[in-house]
Image (cartoon, grey):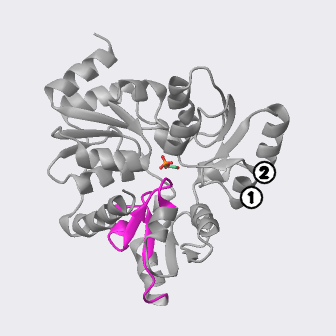
Amino acid sequence: MNYEQQIKKLAAEKNAVILAHNYQPPEIQDVADICGDSLELARLAKEAKESTLVLCGVYFMAETAKILSPEKTVLIPRPEAGCPLADQLTPEIVRQAKAANPGSPFVVYVNSNAATKAECDITCTSANAAAVAASLPEKKILFGPDANLAGWVQRQLPDKEIIPVPADGGCPTHHNFTVRDVESARRAYPDATIICHPECSAAVQQACDLVGSTGYMVRNCGSADEWVILTEKGIVHPLEKRYPDTVFHVMDTAVCPNMKLIELSDLYVTLRDGVYPVQVADHIAGKARMAIEKMIEASK
Ligand code: 13P
């Protein structure tokens, strides 16, 4: 039996479901039961009937799954798969921002650590960030750690005041895209529609035709025949599977090294040995759960 067959067999024996993010390597997405964006993975983690969830993604995604399903075993094949964006917002920075802005709620991007979520009022993903901010009655809203996503929300909600915390938080992979990349893509592929992730800079967002989460891309990139996609290059796999007659261009250098750590052999060992279980301390999980469940409620 090859790895794929052994993984499927072990998952069935152990009553496990395999969830993979849209940026995961193609072979991991292909063996997974379900692929999706951060919001879809959070929802699926809550709804799954299986007793074990295997999260193929970065650590905050596995933590989110554990927070939403404390009674389940949540495993991540490579626990060192971190997120440099998440590490830019500490609980202390949230407390300081709230103390300096009394009465303003803090919307925290799911790309954050559990202890940080526990200090915040509500989470969001890139798929629902504007809807989450719009659902709050307050005008002034603290938002972090991604300042580009904060800016995108601000442009959609001009009546709100969205304050990025920290002022310059960002994802190194998305930070690398430039307006020059958009301009050269327009010259190279004049018929293509250009879409970027909202973690790209404001200038890049404004130079593109569309802005959207990875889930938005998967749902909507059937509406034109040719696309240039500015996000982590793993997205091309679910796009090509779903739209086999559509042409997609991605940048080969747009790689999140953390998203590329998991290999089939790791996933096999995870299922065989039950490694590596994710734990979140009760006092953190309880508060973080409230923030995530508020988001799920607000984006129904
Ligand atoms: P999505 O929610 O769009 O899948 O984005 C996740 C992410 O980590 C972007 O860097």
Does residue 274 sit above or below 111 in this rendering?
A: above
Q: In the image as oriented, which residue stretches furthest toward the top?
A: 1
Classify the position of the C terminus by image quarter.
bottom left
**Residue 274 in the image, given as x and y percentages of width and height:** 19, 36
Does residue 157 sit above or below 74 in this rendering?
A: below
- The residues colored magenta run 101-129
**Residue 241 in the image, given as x and y percentages of width and height:** 51, 24
Label 2 packing within 10 angstroms: few (<14), some (14-19), many (20+): some
Dot placed on the residue nearer the N-terminal end, 1 or 2: 2
Instruction: Give amino acid for label 1.
Output: Ala
Q: Are marks 1 and 2 in contact (CB under 8 Å)?
A: yes
Looking at the rendering, which quadrant does residue 233 occupy? top right
Looking at the rendering, which quadrant does residue 269 occupy? top left
Classify the position of the N terminus by image quarter.
top left
Which residue is pictured at 24% across the width and 63% down the height? 285
For this view, does 40 lie left or right of residue 288?
Answer: right
Q: Which residue is mark 2?
A: 179
**Residue 216 in the image, given as x and y percentages of width and height:** 53, 44
Q: In the image as oriented, which residue stretches furthest toward the right?
A: 187
**Residue 177 in the image, given as x and y percentages of width and height:** 70, 48
The answer to if 207 sits in the magenta stretch is no
Looking at the rendering, which quadrant does residue 255 occupy? top right
Nearer to the camera, 77 or 27: 27
Nearer to the camera, 238 or 277: 238
Q: CA distance from mark 1 to mark 2?
A: 6 Å
Instruction: Give amino acid for label 2.
Output: Val
Which residue is pictured at 15% across the width and 40% down the height? 51
Element type at mark 1: helix
Asked whether residue 234 is in view, the answer is yes
Q: Which mark is residue 203?
A: 1
Element type at mark 2: helix
